[in-house]
Image (cartoon, grey):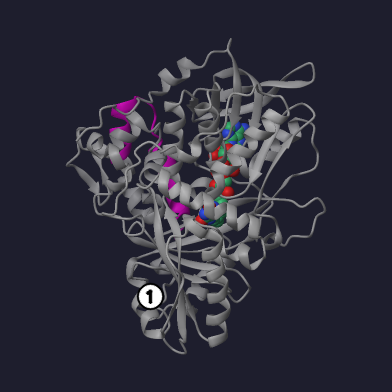
Amino acid sequence: MLTPVPPSLTRRQDLLGLLDPQTVYDMAIVGGGATGLGLALDAASRGYSVVLVESDDFAKGTSSRSTKLVHGGVRYLAQGNIALVREALHERSNLLRNAPHIAQPLPFVMPTYSWWDKFFYGAGLKMYDALAGKAGLGKTAFLSSDETLHCLPTVQPSGLHGGVKYWDGQFNDSKLALALVRSAALQGALLLNYVRASSLRYAAGKVCGIRCTDALTDQVMDIQARCVVNATGVWVDSLREQDGTVEAMVAPSQGVHIVVDKKFFPGKAALMVPKTADGRVLFAVPWLGKVILGTTDTPRHDLAREPLAFEEEIDFILSESARYLRLAPTRADVKSIWVGLRPLVKPPKEEGDNTKALSREHTVLVSASGLVTVTGGKWTTYRAMAQDVMDKCLESHLIEPKGASVTEHLTLVGAEATDAAPVSIGEPEGLHSYGSEQAWVEALPGHDHWLCDGLSEAMVRFAARYEYAVRVEDVLARRSRLLFLDAQLAAQLAPQVGEILFSETGLEPDVDGFVRLAKQYTLQA
Ligand SMILES: Cc1cc2nc3c(=O)[nH]c(=O)nc-3n(C[C@H](O)[C@H](O)[C@H](O)COP(=O)(O)OP(=O)(O)OC[C@H]3O[C@@H](n4cnc5c(N)ncnc54)[C@H](O)[C@@H]3O)c2cc1C
């Protein structure tokens, strides 16, 4: 059944036409990842006028490359960061409630090979439960070796002592980003992808707006704003430098993920290894019918938009997986490989290149000119980060008070509880992630023309009409997740997707650019 309110159209020319150079907006946000989008929703839903610009597509940066966990962070508990874990557990439950079509609970099993590990990690995870309190998703349980093998059928049985099962959440990160974009737009914010903030504008020494360039036409646009927020993730130091700050705030760290077929890791639970050979955490997570293996934590000083994995990172993930899985994937089994950059906030004094030790918390700074910068944190805590930014803006008198945040109980576009096909399994049609908007997809031309499992012609049309998609990459990487699940198949479908997109938007869909990019996501590149 169609929802009574149709989805809002996102024709690029119309959206650009809404940008008024004479208006002084309350807030101009630079960066359309989790942080900027969460802020746009918070500010717009309090009644502020908001413009957000994203130089590429929404969630093109780190926010589409996470491990897809909505979590308190078991490893931060091990580091003794109780406040961070408690906040994240609270936000975990907000997110699962406000976007149930995109984020759901998932059981995790930690296999143990000694009684001490079972006791030690089990006790820690009982504390994780206690910290979650009413926001808990299920009780931590000690498992026998048979029960562990039942949950993780392909885990190494030799020497297996048992396991510990606990609960966290899982989500589809770029779909959540789009739900935030569309929810913020419903609250009156204007959000533009493919518009880059090229410089800051000043009046009497204070930041009063941004100069932007349309990345598709090179047209220059000025935006006036009372408050400018730099939410550009690992790239925040570039705008800060323009603003006169010389000391870098971010120490980027690279995380690689590998995707393989479900046969290597069947079952409904995720695998969590708390301490790999070099002291990291490794996950095997069922996601949209495939399995994500990862991740790494490697310092990285260049800030490419499409960073490449180091050979040793690939070897590390495959060799660690082989220690825990009976049927170990090899390089030939890799369906997709993708890399994200963590915006880790530097401590006041450099403590070397050990990024595992850097803070996972977020930081909000206001410069002498009034430029607000927010970075760090994690996807799970995007909502709390937005509240902190708003508090800082109010404290610094950059905006007038208008009322408290309402996002804790604000459901996102499409929110509809579903237990038909959770994110971990996916379903052949892939319609569940549209939640209450599913019927709108099915009403579009091509709803019965399937390009592959999980992607129909109608979905491409929906992406162009209602989800801001311009390029083939926008559809195949972030509206559908095919690039992240099977890069070769994604490349094969690019021409068809390009044709449908062009028929909807009349804009160049850049098929060739996508095919080149997809090569980078395979190990044959
Ligand atoms: C490997 C890895 C795994 C992770 N796993 C998890 C997880 O499982 N769960 C979890 O909760 N968190 C996880 N995180 C953390 C989480 O993904 C990040 O904290 C979050 O996505 C950061 O969002 P952001 O908006 O700050 O940055 P980004 O998503 O990078 O957004 C910044 C945006 O700014 C844009 N931009 C840059 N310059 C400009 C400009 N001049 N003009 C306009 N736009 C500009 C960029 O294009 C980019 O889209 C993970 C991170 C990594 C790296």
Note whether residue 339 is visible. no
Residue type marked 1: Leu
164 on left or right of 308: left
411 on left or right of 350: left
Task: Give the residues in magenta.
Answer: 496-525
Q: Please identify the residue farthest to the bottom as the structure is shown.
A: 159
519 on left or right of 20: left
Note whether residue 40 is visible. yes
| Quarter of the image where ligand 1 sits | top right
Query: Looking at the image, is 199 positioned above or below residue 122?
Result: above
Residue 495 falls in image quadrant? top left
> For residue 310: magenta?
no
Placement of the N terminus among the 4 image quadrants: top left
Q: Please identify the residue farthest to the top as the structure is shown.
A: 22
| Residue 339: x %, y % from top left | 53, 54
| Residue 138: x %, y % from top left | 42, 64
How many labels sit on residues?
1
Q: Residues within 10 Å of mark 1 (few under 14, many from 20)?
A: many
| Residue 257: x %, y % from top left | 49, 60
Please name the residue shown 48% across and 57% down the image.
Answer: 134
| Residue 349: x %, y % from top left | 82, 53
Query: Looking at the image, is 132 positioned above or below residue 282?
Result: above
Q: Secondary structure at mark 1?
A: loop
Please name the residue shown 64% across and 31% down the image.
Answer: 229
Q: Where is mark 1, residue-wise?
A: 152
> For residue 515: magenta?
yes
Q: Please identify the residue farthest to the front as the structure is shown.
A: 134
Query: Looking at the image, is 463 positioned above or below residue 138?
Result: above
